[in-house]
Image (cartoon, grey):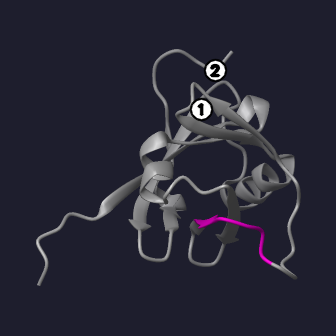
Amino acid sequence: MSNEKPLNARMTIDIKRYRFRIHKTTLHSLGYPKFVQILINPENLYMTILGLDKPIVGGTSKKIIVELSNKSNMEFTSAELFGKILEIFGMLDFRYSYHLSGEIDQINRVAYFYLNTIKKVEGRPAR
């Protein structure tokens, strides 16, 4: 039995801008992938991010805008992904950002985010 702690995955959702931010520690644990595939399971309330070195041949994908923020976080916008999250939670407060947490499977380069861990970022509302 291993005493290793599971690696934590972190993501922030900026609802006002439809922006998703995958945190540096998560990207590091996924081996700084060149591509990511995002899947949502609404029945079991989790989202996965699969780290890839190249796109999946024959896989369905939608091009998303990716920005590297200070060479640390991966940011992208997706109204479609945001819509899926709203289908699960209903309306969220557009004045705030939200954090999701989960675990990382380093061997398979997958981050699992549990949608029931969503937490409003208290303090200053998003601009």
Which kind of residue does numbered mark 1 sit on? Answer: Ser
- Asked if residue 50 is among those painted magenta in the image, a careful observer would answer yes
81 relative to 8 in the view: left or right: right
Q: Give the range drawn in magenta.
A: 48-56
Report the front residue among 8 and 27. Answer: 27
Which kind of residue does numbered mark 2 sit on? Answer: Ala
Label 1: which residue?
97
Residue 21, position in %: x, y? 61, 40
Residue 18, position in %: x, y? 77, 38
Residue 9, position in %: x, y? 43, 54
- Rendering quarter of residue 20: top right
Taking 77 as reference, is 4 above or below it? below
Figure quadrant of the C terminus: top right
Query: Which residue is depicted at the point 51% across and 61% down?
Result: 113
- Rendering quarter of residue 4: bottom left
Report the front residue among 35 and 14. Answer: 35
Residue 94, position in %: x, y? 71, 30
